[in-house]
Image (spheres, rainbow, N blue to C red):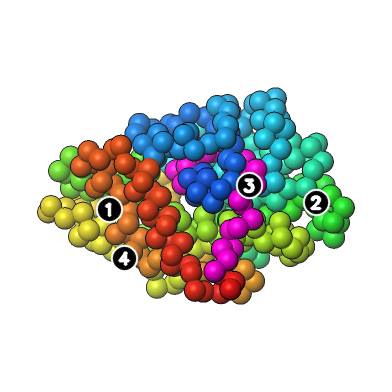
C-alpha cells in the first residue's frame, strides 16, 4: 500500500514552533517519514516538555533557536534549509495568557506569520506552506452547530482575535503574492488550518485541561476544573497533524488552486463533549482513584462555552477523516503520561513513535491509501 505521505521522503521541511507540543509531534512524524526536518523556534517554555523528553533534536537535520519576530534569523534559517514544505506553528497559543500579554500575542501570531510568508515571497522558490491558526479564529456567536471555513472571523479574547487577524493577513499575502490562478508560475501553495482542542502526551502548558489534570494526578491530587460544562472539539494531536500532512502533500502533488484555502480539522460530532465528560474518561484511564472537582472562580476571564467545528470540506475534498474516537485518544494520552511518570523517560521517544505507528496503521486500507 502506498502511503499518502510518501512525498515527504527525502524532502526538506521547515517546522516553525518545533519545540512546542504540536510542533514536536509533527517533527517526530516527519522524521519518521524520511524527511530532512529543520526546526525554528524559541526554547521550550515548560519543563518538562515533549521536545526534550522525546529527544526530538536527535532526529533533526538542523534547528535554529530564535524568535519568529527575528526576521534576519528567520530568513537565514529558511534560506539555508531550502524547504519543499513549510509548516508554520510558532505562536503564542494560550487564551488566558493573551489577557496578560495582549500586544505580544498579536505581534507573535500576526506579524510572525507575515514574516514567514515574506521570507517565502523573497525566496522565489516553489513551496507548499501550511499556516496553522486556530478553531478560535471564528466569531463565536454561541451557535451549537459547527463553524465552517466560510463563517465570519473574530474573537473576544486577544488570542482568538489575533488568530482571526492572522487569517486575514495570510489571505492578503496569498492573494497579493501567491495568487491561486498563477500557481504554475510562482509555485507557492499557501493554506491555513484550524484545528480543534488537541490532547496527547507531552503537553505541560499552563491552563490547559489535560496538562492541569496530569500535574494534579501525578501528585495524587484531585483535578480542579474551571469550566466543566464547556463543550470543545477534542481530538488526539495526531489527528490534525495527519490533516496538515495530507493537505501539504496534496498541494505539492497537484497544485490545485482550491487547496490553497482554509481548512478545519476536528473530530466527528459525537466526540465533541463537555470538559466534565473528558475528565470522567481521563480519570478512569488514569486509575488509582483519580478524581476531579469543579473549581468555582469569580471574575474569571471570558472563555467560550461552546465551540464546534464542521469538517465536511476536509472529508469530501481531501478524503481525510478522524481515526481515533475520544476513548482511544484519551487512552493513548493517559498511557503516554503514565509511561513518563513511571520513570521510563529514556524510552519516551519510542512511546511517541509507537503512537504514530498505531495512527498510521489506522489509516491503512482506507481511501487515503492507494494500492
Would you call the spot at circle 4 few (<14 residues within 10 Å), some (14-19), or many (20 or more)? some
Front disc: 4 or 1: 1
Mark 4 residue element: helix
| Residue at which label 1 appears | 335
Identify the magenta region: 1-26
Q: Which mark is residue 327?
A: 4
**Quadrant position of residue 198:** bottom left
Name the residue furthest left.
Answer: 289
First in sequence: mark 2 vs mark 1: 2
Tell whether 197 sits left or right of 166: left
Q: Is tag 4's residue or tag 1's residue first in the polypeptide sequence?
A: 4
C-alpha span from label 3 to label 1: 32 Å
Q: Is residue 2 magenta?
A: yes
Q: Is residue 277 left or right of residue 240?
A: left
Residue at 74%, 63% (x, y): give it: 254
Observer-side mark, 4 or 3, equals 3
Amino acid at each position: 500500500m502506498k502511503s499518502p505521505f510518501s512525498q515527504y521522503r527525502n524532502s526538506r521541511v521547515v517546522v516553525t514552533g518545533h519545540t512546542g507540543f504540536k510542533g514536536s509531534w509533527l517533527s517526530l512524524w516527519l522524521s519518521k517519514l524520511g524527511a530532512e526536518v529543520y526546526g525554528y523556534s524559541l526554547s521550550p517554555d515548560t519543563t518538562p516538555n515533549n521536545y526534550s523528553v522525546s529527544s526530538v533534536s536527535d532526529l533533526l537535520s538542523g534547528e535554529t533557536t530564535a524568535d519568529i519576530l527575528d526576521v534576519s534569523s528567520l530568513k537565514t534559517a529558511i534560506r539555508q534549509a531550502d524547504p519543499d514544505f513549510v509548516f508554520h506553528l510558532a505562536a503564542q497559543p494560550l487564551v488566558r495568557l493573551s489577557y496578560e500579554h495582549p500586544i505580544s500575542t498579536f505581534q507573535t501570531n500576526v506579524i510572525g506569520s507575515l514574516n514567514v510568508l515574506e521570507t517565502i515571497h523573497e525566496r522565489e522558490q516553489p513551496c507548499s506552506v501550511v499556516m496553522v491558526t486556530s478553531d478560535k479564529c471564528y466569531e463565536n456567536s454561541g451557535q451549537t452547530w459547527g463553524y465552517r471555513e466560510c463563517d465570519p472571523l473574530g474573537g473576544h479574547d486577544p488570542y482568538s482575535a489575533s488568530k482571526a487577524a492572522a487569517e486575514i493577513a495570510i489571505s492578503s499575502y496569498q492573494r497579493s503574492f501567491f495568487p491561486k490562478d498563477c500557481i504554475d508560475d510562482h509555485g507557492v501553495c499557501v493554506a491555513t488550518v484550524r484545528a480543534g482542542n488537541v490532547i496527547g502526551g507531552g503537553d505541560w502548558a499552563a491552563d490547559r485541561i489535560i496538562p492541569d489534570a496530569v500535574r494534579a494526578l501525578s501528585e495524587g491530587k484531585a483535578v480542579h476544573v474551571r469550566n466543566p460544562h464547556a463543550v470543545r472539539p477534542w481530538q488526539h494531536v495526531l489527528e490534525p497533524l495527519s490533516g496538515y500532512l495530507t493537505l501539504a502533500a496534496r498541494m505539492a502533488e497537484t497544485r490545485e488552486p482550491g487547496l490553497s484555502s482554509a481548512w478545519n480539522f476536528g473530530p466527528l460530532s459525537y466526540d465533541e463533549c463537555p470538559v466534565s465528560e473528558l475528565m470522567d474518561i481521563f480519570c478512569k484511564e488514569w486509575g488509582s482513584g483519580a478524581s476531579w472537582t469543579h473549581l468555582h472562580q469569580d471574575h474569571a476571564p471570558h472563555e467560550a462555552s461552546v465551540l464546534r467545528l464542521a469538517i465536511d470540506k476536509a472529508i469530501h475534498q481531501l478524503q481525510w477523516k478522524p481515526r481515533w474516537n475520544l476513548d482511544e485518544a484519551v487512552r493513548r494520552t493517559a498511557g503516554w503520561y503514565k509511561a513518563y511518570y513511571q520513570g521510563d523517560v529514556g524510552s519516551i521517544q519510542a512511546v511517541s513513535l509507537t503512537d504514530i505507528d498505531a495512527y498510521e496503521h489506522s489509516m491503512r486500507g482506507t481511501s487515503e491509501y492507494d494500492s
